[in-house]
Structure formats: C-alpha cells, structure tokens
Image (cartoon, rainbow, N blue to C red):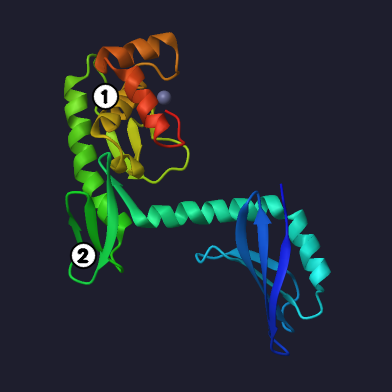
Amino acid sequence: MKRAFLFLSIHCKIRMVKKMKLEIAGESYPIIIEKKKTTKNLYIRVKDDLAVHITCHTFTSDRQIEEIIRKNQKSIVDMIHRMKQKKKREEEFYFLGKKYDIVYTEFCDISLGKDKVFIHRDFDLDKWKKKQALSLFQEHLETCYDRFSRKIPHPTLRIRKMKSRWGVCNTKTHVITLNLELITKDIHCLDYVIMHELSHLVEPNHSKRFWSVVEENCRNYKYYRKLTNEIGEEEV
Ligand SMILES: [Zn+2]
C-alpha cells in the first residue's frame, strides 16, 4: 500500500488544529488533528465528512501521530469503509426488493414514488418499516402456514433486527422470529425464509430430510436461498 503524509496548516495556541492527508492505494483521505491540553489519550474517529479526526494531547508530536496512523492503518481504512457504507445506506432505501433514492423533504413524513422516496429528516424509518413488516409478515406467515404440506403447530411471529440471521425458529415454543430487514428484500425471499423456518417445526436440523420438506413447500428454494443470501450478508 502506498502511503504519504502531507501537512497543510497549523493554527491557534492551546487548541491546535492541523490538517494532513493520508494516501492509501491511490485514494486520498483528509486527516484532521486536534491537539488539546485536556485530552489525555489519542482518539481516532471517522466522521460523516469521511475525514479521519484525531484528537490528542498538545504534547503529542507529529512523528508520534504519524506512527500511530501507520500502525492503525488497517482499522482506519475499515472505519472509512464502514462510514461509506453507512452514508450509502442513508441515501438509498430498499423496500420489497426495489431500490429508491432518498429525497429529504419538509412536506410529508414518508411518500413512496416510482423510484424515489420522500422522507422527512426526523421521520423514524425503522418504526415505519416495523409497522409495515408486522402486517405483511403476519399475513405471509398465515398464508404459508395454510399452504404448508405437513401438519405443524401454529407458530407465533416475532420481528426484530438481527445481524446474522434472516429467520430463527424455536422448535419448543413454536416462535418464529423474522429479521426486520426482510422488508427490504423481494417478497419471494420472505416466503422462502418463512417456509424454511416452518420446515424446522418438522425437522430441527439442516438435514437432507429438512431440505426435502423445504422443497415440498418452495419449489425454487435453491434460487431464493441464493438470492436471499446474495443480497445480504446473512445466511439462512
Ligand atoms: Zn435453518
């Protein structure tokens, strides 16, 4: 990786702000260093201006800072990457498999257009998604349950945000928990995940028998399993 540090400016006496640039693999990232008398440790943060903000004590030398940046280069690049992803998420909105560009407005809470969604800045999008998910997931769970090829106990639905799973089935309590983020995916992915979790009420493990129960209820399960996992990092 190619690195270069470039010092740009120094101001002030007690609270010193210095700007640098960090170049990694052809990309240039601004570094803003703030030296304060009151700061004991050194903090590295990436803010949504995509600059690397470093706060440290007035006596921390530039050489020390350069060394710390060098040592933490990988985690700094990771932080920048995560912030870029977060900003992208704030500009795009996925609903039932369709991508909408977010347009912030003062005139309504939320309004879905053809390929734009108009949202008020203070609008709680997660709460709205949960409300949509509650009725839609319940309706699809009932339809899938009625269509299910085997006799199984009637499941109870729970919805929450999960980091690594699309769905979870508790085979003892018959509670099926679906990931709220399924609301962003194609509706067939939701049905596939529901059929997958219902199949666990017949066969708890991912055995051959389990997959044949899934296939009985979702003919194209291989396609939708791939699609569900492709468009997220989670596995089902
Ligand atoms: Zn499973």
Does the closest atom of ligand 1 sit within 8 Å of the Cβ of label 2? no
- The quadrant of the picture showing ligand 1 is top left
Q: Residues within 10 Å of mark 2 (few under 14, many from 20)?
A: some
Question: Which quadrant holds the C terminus?
Answer: top left
**Residue drawn 82% across the image and 74% down it:** 61
How far across and how far down the image is residue 11, in percent? 68, 86
Numbered disc 2: secondary structure: loop
Q: As shown in the figure, which amino acid type bears the numbered disc 2?
A: Asp
* Labels 1 and 2: the sequence-earlier one: 2
**The label number, if any, that marks residue 40 in the structure image:** none
Which residue is labeled 1 in the image? 153
171 up-or-down from 128: above or below? above
86 up-or-down from 34: above or below? above
Numbered disc 1: secondary structure: loop
Residue 205 or residue 186, whichever sits in front:
186
Residues at circles 1 and 2 in contact by the CB criterion of under 8 Å: no
Residue 137, image quadrant: top left
How far across and how far down the image is residue 86, in percent? 46, 55
Could you give the CA–CA distance between mark 1 and mark 2, rounded to whole angstroms? 40 Å
Residue 117 or residue 206, whichever sits in front:
117
How far across and how far down the image is residue 123, in percent? 28, 65
Which residue is labeled 2 in the image? 109
Position of 60 with respect to 186 (left or right) is right
Position of 180 with respect to 117 (left or right) is right
Q: As shown in the figure, which amino acid type bears the numbered disc 1?
A: Pro
**Residue drawn 47% across the image and 42% down it:** 163
Q: Nearer the viewer, mark 1 or mark 2?
A: 2
